[in-house]
Image: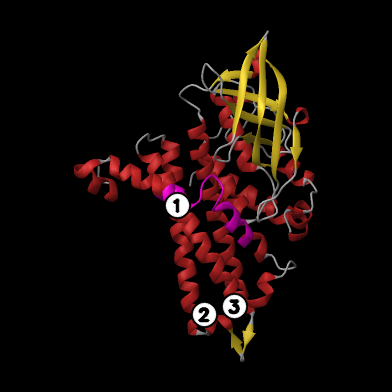
């Protein structure tokens, strides 16, 4: 980790430790926007870590943004940090201005589509998108819309849309957003081109969720180790029992596997390896999702009844593991992608594909 990333990780960890407690997370689930936490992150340049300096950002890259998301996942931060990164990637990729404040993206869910057509001096946007993260609380939405001339990227103010509230398993906003004859000036719409696309958005979103899962796995392991080290049963800490130690070993292995897969995907995405990145990201989302299910089961088993209570912090992490493993595609979607990529490599390329020696 270079000095820039160490600074991002240390600064983010300190802010989250000081400002992101269980009561704030619970309030966010009840619909309260964590304005002070967002402002603190914004003042430290973390909400625009991967936005270029020309666009008013910190001038970092995808690896810097993922460093922030790893810390945010570990702290169960209830903010659209991943979505703001994705929106910035879409907008800057086509030369549109990246506005300040919280951002989100649409559409995300399979089968959802938005449609845009040219009108006098501009464009008209229509359609609806489901499960949009922080669709009502973001200031702007970066959208990919279908047009006769090809996909277009547009910037839309949330106040011009209609939203219906919803939540994922973690209690994070996942809203339905309706775009009803929204007139956009020509300057706010650009063709998607080769640099950004819906496929690229889904892939980068899967990377972001993989990293967030890796962070939450780190948090689950730390919380569980603390608990079994302090909880005394039959005169000794739970961590002294062999059966508990065995479960801890499995948990640690899953955390390591999910984290390593995410690290590989980040490195491949940062290097912009056209052949390696799709494989690495598919592997990361599939493996992190698998680890999420196993880790959530073990950590709750070792915590017993207290792990299921609202008052205890574990549920903020485990519910995010369950929610994030499905977003931007569950394991089976990415496993199938890996299968197709492997089949595409052909009989002579299969072994190099599996071993990474090609």
Quick check: 100 left or right of 334?
right
Q: Nearer the viewer, mark 3 or mark 2?
A: 2
Q: Residues within 10 Å of mark 2 (few under 14, many from 20)?
A: some
> Label 1 belongs to which residue?
332
Residue at image point 51% right, 47% down = 329
Q: Nearer the viewer, mark 1 or mark 3?
A: 1
Q: Secondary structure at mark 2?
A: helix
- Tell me the quadrant of the picture where the C terminus can be found: top left
In the image, 54 versus 358, the foreground residue is 358
Residue at 67% across, 76% down: 305
- Tell me if residue 47 can be seen: no
Q: Which residue position holds label 2?
A: 244
N-terminal of the two: label 1 or label 3?
3
Is residue 22 visible in the rendered structure shown here? yes
Say if the magenta span includes residue 152.
Answer: no
Say which residue appears at 47% left-offset and 26% top-offset. 195
How far separated are the C-alphas under marks 2 and 1? 30 Å
In primary-sequence order, the first of circles 3 and 2 is 3
Helix or strand or loop: what does disc 3 sit on? helix
Based on the displayed image, in which of its 4 quarters is residue 53 positioned?
top right
What residue span does the magenta drawing correspond to? 318-335
- Are there few (<14), some (14-19), or many (20+) residues within 10 Å of tag 3? few
Circle 1: is it few (<14), some (14-19), or many (20+) Cα within 10 Å?
A: some
- Residue 97's quadrant in the figure? top right
Q: Which mark is residue 229?
A: 3
Label 2 vs 1, first from the N-terminus: 2
């Amino acid at each position: 980790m270079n000095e820039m990333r160490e600074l991002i990780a240390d600064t983010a960890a300190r802010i989250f430790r000081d400002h992101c407690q269980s009561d704030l997370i619970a309030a966010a689930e009840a619909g309260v926007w964590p304005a002070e936490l967002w402002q603190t992150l914004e003042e430290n340049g973390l909400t625009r870590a991967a936005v270029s300096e020309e666009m008013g950002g910190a001038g970092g890259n995808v690896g810097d943004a993922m460093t922030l998301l790893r810390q945010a996942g570990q702290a169960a931060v209830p903010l659209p940090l991943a979505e703001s990164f994705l929106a910035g990637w879409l907008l800057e990729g086509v030369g549109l201005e990246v506005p300040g404040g919280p951002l989100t993206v649409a559409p995300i869910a399979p089968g959802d589509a938005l449609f845009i057509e040219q009108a006098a001096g501009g464009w008209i946007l229509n359609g609806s998108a489901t499960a949009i993260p922080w669709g009502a609380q973001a200031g702007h939405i970066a959208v990919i819309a279908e047009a006769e001339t090809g996909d277009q990227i547009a910037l839309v103010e949330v106040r011009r849309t209609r939203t219906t509230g919803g939540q994922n398993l973690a209690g994070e906003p996942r809203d339905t957003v309706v775009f009803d004859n929204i007139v956009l000036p020509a300057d706010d719409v650009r063709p998607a081109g080769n640099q950004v696309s819906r496929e690229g958005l889904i892939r980068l979103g899967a990377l972001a969720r993989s990293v967030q899962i890796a962070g939450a796995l780190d948090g689950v392991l730390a919380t569980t180790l603390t608990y079994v080290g302090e909880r005394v049963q039959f005169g000794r800490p739970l961590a002294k029992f062999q059966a508990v130690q065995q479960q801890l070993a499995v948990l640690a292995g899953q955390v390591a596997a999910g984290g390593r897969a995410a690290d590989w995907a980040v490195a491949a995405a940062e290097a912009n390896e056209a052949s390696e990145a799709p494989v690495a990201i598919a592997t990361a989302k599939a493996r992190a999702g698998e680890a999420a299910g196993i880790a959530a089961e073990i950590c709750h088993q070792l915590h017993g009844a207290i792990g299921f209570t609202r008052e205890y912090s574990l549920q903020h992490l485990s519910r995010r593991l369950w929610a994030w493993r499905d977003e931007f595609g569950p394991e089976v979607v990415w496993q199938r992608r890996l299968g197709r990529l492997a089949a595409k490599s052909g009989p002579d390329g299969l072994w190099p594909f599996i071993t990474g020696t090609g």
